[in-house]
Image: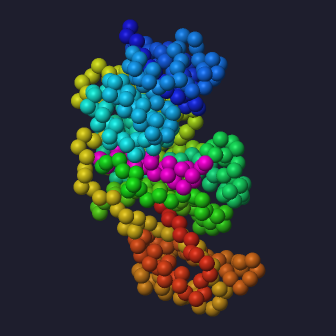
Amino acid sequence: MRSIKLGLIGFGTVGSAVYTVLNRNREDIKCRLGHDFQLSSICIRNQKRAALFVDSSVRVCSDPREVINSDVDIVIEVIGGTDSAKSIIEKSLKNKKHVVTANKELIALHGRQLFEIAENNEVMLLYEAAVAGGVPIIKSIREGLSANQITLVAGIINGTTNYILTEMQKSRSNFKDVLNIAIKKGYAEQDPTYDVEGIDAAHKLAIIASLSFGVEINYQTVYCEGISNIDLKDIDYAEKFGYRIKLLGIAKLTQSGIELRVHPTLVPHENLMANVDGAMNGIMVYGDAVGPTIFYGQGAGGEATASSVISDIIDICRLSSANSENYVPYTAYRINKHSIPVLPIDDTRASYYLRLAVKDQVGVMAKITKLLAALSISIEAMYQGEQIGGGSSVEVVIISHETVERDINAAISKIQHLDFVEGPIKLLRIQDLGLK
């Protein structure tokens, strides 16, 4: 029975989980593969941690080069970051080692270059764990849905922000308080910027778009807006109109081009995506043949991510003896559709939520309505709240029908300059994904 040798670089939350799951499910994995595997070396900075958790039969080192230059067949990179990880993966590929990574930022920023190195050296670079943790979204788009023209991928692809928004709604707490709880519970990093500002989700969406539409991975083309400006009152008003606020990643193929956007979104209560709570991920993929398909599960966490890492290891073991021309393309398409433009956010279409404070005086609502009508923006609903702080101002919330973002921004600019408007106008987008 042939034995595949594995080298693991990184032994944090994900690395230790890979080690645990490989050992726990060894017999099942062997039966699925038809041959054996051996975790022969691990690179760990903390040697005391190695002594506590790692079996004495495994060679432990502190220098990644010892793994890369050893006789392992597959290098598993789970250290995170970009600089060191990029160097490790490049050296491994050039050394004719297959590589598995969970590093979404690295793939989003340098994927094209790394895939070329892999192809030139006739080895594989797989990254299922880079998007949505344990949810097999990459394999599903790249293989299971490969007969379809995919026109829309939309969903919750960051568990930290979903946890925060869920807790704000349930506990009636503000953003900063819930963020601190999320950090203490380990749902958010000590520096949560990548999560709460939508950057992590944007990295993942760039990868998803490439798989779905056959375009280059280009994180810079993704419109990105986080949740740090979401107030509890926005969540309350959304509820009044029958919506919940979720941070969505949306990749949409239109006749004009591709919409790529990450932003807080009002989703109808009855929509399945509105009911994905806590730190879970939920992704909808729409294909022309299959229609809507839903993927739900843990988007982060040690063992969930390890599940995807090990699925890539199994794929490499199965395909390692195949001709490289028979590998499934890394980004699903062998020939990219370079001609499809990515639309600027101003050219995208949505319905909109506007919240503004105005002086409580006669004719205010009529003037706002008239101004919107002049720009061909139709109002679906309007709500006037109580007086703000017992003073002479009231809060107004407007829900528009679908329109072009450029037009809604022009309307906001005009409304903002009206003498009865007080303070900045809040804008959120509304998306009905048709999932009920």
As drawn, 18 above or below 174 = above
Does 182 sit left or right of 5 as displayed?
Answer: right
Does 49 sit left or right of 329 as displayed?
Answer: right
Residue, far top: 1
The overriding secondary structure of the stretch rendered in magenta is helix
Is residue 208 in the magenta section?
Answer: yes
Work out whether residue 351 or residue 318 is closer to the camera in this orientation and state it.
Answer: 318
Q: Position of residue 158 (x, y in %)?
A: 53, 47
Which residues make up the magenta segment? 191-214
Is residue 1 in the magenta section?
Answer: no
Look at 66% across and 66% down and name the residue there. 233
Look at 55% across and 39% down and name the residue there. 300
Look at 29% across and 63% down and name the residue there. 256
As drawn, 346 above or below 204 = below
Q: Position of residue 64 (x, y in %)?
A: 47, 26
Q: Position of residue 337 (x, y in %)?
A: 25, 50
Does 72 sit left or right of 289 as displayed?
Answer: right
As drawn, 364 above or below 399 = below
Work out whether residue 435 or residue 225 is closer to the camera in this orientation and state it.
Answer: 225
- Viewer can see residue 430: yes
